[in-house]
Image (spheres, grey):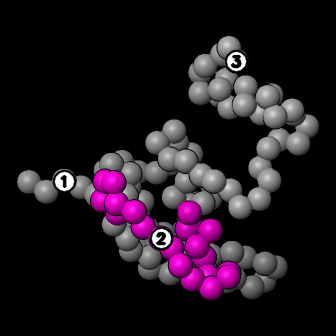
Amino acid sequence: MQAHPKLKISHLQKSFTNGRSTIKVLDDINLEVGDNEFVSLVGASGCGKSTLLSIIAGLQDYEQGEMLIDGSSINGPGRDRGVVFQSYTLLPWLTALQNVEFALRETGHDAK
């Protein structure tokens, strides 16, 4: 019996709407990544790499397709995935320590 892939993306589609125009940024994306497999996404600026990673992280929605981690649907952010953002992502009204404490509280841990 063959194990399922760690990540499986099937027929993924994502569009952005700006006023009256709609731009399809991901169209029929299919990808399987095995456990402990290393994959790089390479492409020109604006081709959808960051959008795809944000969808995998559960931070953006998509119109069509299926996304599975360990055989389960991705329905939002999860502790089974990590993201290193390209830009500043702390909550600016909190200190660095308060940002860390916030993340801990959200996962059911106390600040200690």
**Residue identifier under label 3:** 111
Residue 40 circle label: 2
The answer to whether residue 87 is left or right of residue 9 is right
Residue type at mark 3?
Ala
Q: Position of residue 54 (x, y in %)?
A: 60, 60
Please state the extent of the stretch shown in magenta in the rendering.
33-53
Predominant SS of the magenta segment = loop
Q: Nearer the viewer, residue 91 or 39?
A: 39
Question: Could one spot residue 88 in this view of the protein?
Answer: yes
Question: Could one spot residue 6 in this view of the protein?
Answer: no
* Circle 3: element type: loop
Check disc 2: other Cα within 10 Å, few if <14, some if 14-19, many if 20+.
few
Residue 86, by quadrant, is bottom right
N-terminal of the two: label 3 or label 1?
1
What is the CA distance from the residue labelled 2 to the residue labelled 3?
Answer: 35 Å
Q: Is residue 81 above or below residue 34?
A: above
Q: Position of residue 89 (x, y in %)?
A: 77, 49
